[in-house]
Image: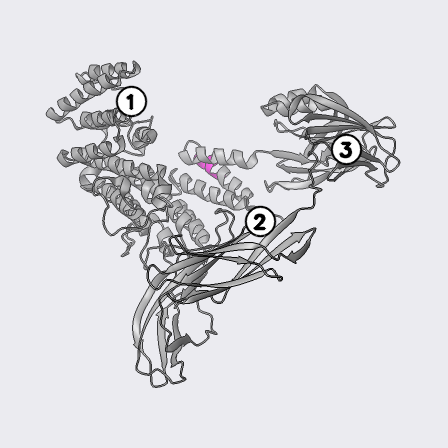
Amino acid sequence: MKRLSLIFTVILFSQMLQAQDNGDSYTSLWKEVLKLESEDLTKSALKLVETISSKAEKENNSEQVVKALLFVSKYAMTLEEDAQLNIINRFKAEIEKAEFPTKNILESYLANLHWQYFQQNRYQFYDRSNTESKVDSVDFRTWDLRTLFHEIDTHFQASLENKKELQETNLKGLKELLNQQKGSETFRPTLYDILAHTALQFYKTNETAITRPADKYEINDPETICEAYQFAHYDINTNDDTSLQAKALKIYQELIQFHFDEPKLELLVMADIERLNFVYQNGTFESKETYYEETLKNSAEHLKHNQISALYSYELAQLYYTQGRTYHAETKEETRWKNKEALALCDEVIARFPDSMGAEKCKSLRLQILTPSLSIITEQHVAVNQPSKLLVNCKNLSSLQLTAYAVNSNEIKELERLYPPEKQLTFIEKLKQVKSWSATLKNEKDYQQHGIEVLLPALENGQYIILASPEKENNESFAFSKIQVTDMALVETNGNSEQRYQIINRTTGKPVSGADLTFTYLKNYNKPYLTKKERTDKMGFVTIPLTTENWNDVKIEVNHNEEKAFIGEYYVNGKRETNTLNTISNQLFLFTDRSIYRPGQPVYFKGILMETSEEKSKVVADESVSAVLYDVNGQEITELEFTTNEFGSFNGEFILPSSGLTGEFFIEVDAFSGTANKTQYISVEEYKRPKFITSFEPVTETYKVNDSITVTGIASAYAGSKITNANVSYRVKRAVYFPRWYYWRMPYYNQAPQEIAHGETTTDASGNYNISFKALPDTSLSKKKPTDFQL
């Protein structure tokens, strides 16, 4: 129940603000409320708030009425059992007697309360099927998804009623209800702006589980991404009253129309940019990226002498930057220079309109483009005194300074525990420096990340940290990686009773004999750490006999001819117990003469009892077994007893009851020795032998969405004659198959078939009939999903 407690802090208005000192009697009352609340005297605070509410209603102070209602709702979450439902009902009751503009504000609140309840309980609504009417007209918690979305839409639409009056209502009388920030009145100057943008948060959602009509609305017209003037006169025509996207576009259109003739262009441009981004994200038409880019260019050009055009230019630079991030040297070469275009556009905006909002955004984007990045990848082990390579991935860097620091195992552990990176750098620089060198990088000023191999010079045996940092460049980026220089490598072999390790030369592959191995490990995760020392034989092997205990966090130190190697972490499982006794298992096989029976029919069955020992099987003779027939309710009907013959088999029959429930019966067979059992299911159904059969001619063509399909069938009697002038009833169902990797990692999920057509036809003189239907996809899913049609 307390999950809705956050609702009143994140929706449109803030009820947690301390009342401003406006000189009236409400100020002292609200101070007393906050004092009681701080002392955890919730009931006393609630009582005082109700007093404020009564006072506000008598004085017709809508601002204080709404504020009191919000505080009452907040306290209800703590004090009441069914707070969610009661809060909604309080809002509905207040709306019934409220007048403009209080009613509009409360409608917006109520819509948001329903919307946030869905967001917190989304999984419950997804599991519900649609109903023709509300299960409970009052309790919204019992509704299906379609009903809830319709309710939310209804309240948001109600919040925007009396549009002209809302557009003329400023925010001076609502200061206590608004969580205002400095300068916010520039972007939301009227109550209409606030309520419209609040509704848009719902209408722009990507929730797609709601059932949609066959002619659902989609943003598939390139004209929706046109310039502001054209969009203000664009006809958004749709019969789909469930489309949230269509309603979002209509609100954007009304906002643009409202602010079109204002001398200050900020509100118009910002609403237009929001609309363009919404269409760009949700449009389904081809080449939408091209249309989006062209519209941004044209819009910026039309306002090029006004600093507000910088906002369009920023969006265009952001588009180029997004395209640049898709660059891949092998698969996406064409977007390589997009970051450079974005940077040039940002520089132009900053130079022309340095104090504009667009310039501030461009400065942030410019910093993202120019920020260098650096990472290095090394081999974990390299050969002693042999040069090797490391991989550098970098952006906006021309040269690197690389340093090798000697380090031991304890220092590596300490380094791995350090955070943030600045502490890691300080720690590394205090280590013993062994070698330092520089590397030149190829920087082509495309502001993309590239990978380049850099020489790692020969190093002596030991463990090292390789530190890389920009050379002669004023930035604090760095990267490091650990390596071990050794000629020895370890090969591990797992066995049932022993664990074998072999030390070999990593360059030649030859075994290393006479190497000393020191094992450090935990036994069954219990401290302290234990040690064990072994020496390799002439083939480089060390054998560890397994016990019933596990070795955990195993680290191995290898010493040979003054060379050391540190290898780990490993684990060694305990010895697997094998049953040396000769195990014997019995198995029953049961067969019936058919799988479907009529009531009263005999069921003939046969069973065989087998014995398996040492992977050899033989029949079991002279073994007593019982066979019991059960009905669909698991009630015993008949029991028979048998003794297996020399071939290990037995047979018998049951007579099915002539009356009672039909369905799935089963026969259960058990050996008296308790060594084997078997259950066999059969179906008992009332049926008549068919006198004719219907079939379809094979479909040899392939169809696409919205094609008209005709399927030909034939009806013929088992006697061989054609069935003429017969009525044929048919139903067409579709089943959609689509990938669903997140559901138990099943490769495909099969949606339940849905009926799309039905009807009747008549066979002709040859017993033939034709069925035609249209290949309509599932409207609640993407058209790209494969669909089967079933007749």
What label sits on residue 17 in the rendered view?
Answer: 1
Which is nearer the eye, 784 or 17? 784
Please name the residue shown 45% across and 73% down the image.
Answer: 699
Question: What is the distance, in whole Å, between disc 1 and disc 3 at their CAs?
Answer: 71 Å
Q: Amino acid at mark 3?
A: Pro
Residue 352 located within the stretch drawn in magenta: yes
Residues shaded magenta? 348-353
Mark drawn on residue 751: none
Mark 1 or 3: the one toward you? 3
Question: What percent of the width, then of the height, locates residue 380?
Answer: 73, 35
Check disc 3: other Cα within 10 Å, few if <14, some if 14-19, many if 20+: few
Principal secondary structure, stretch drawn in magenta: helix
Q: Position of residue 214 (x, y in %)?
A: 32, 59
Cα separation between marks 2 and 3: 37 Å
Residue 132 point in image, percent of width and height: 24, 52
Tell me the tag on residue 675: 2
Residue identifier under label 3: 545
Against 712, residue 217 (above or below) is above
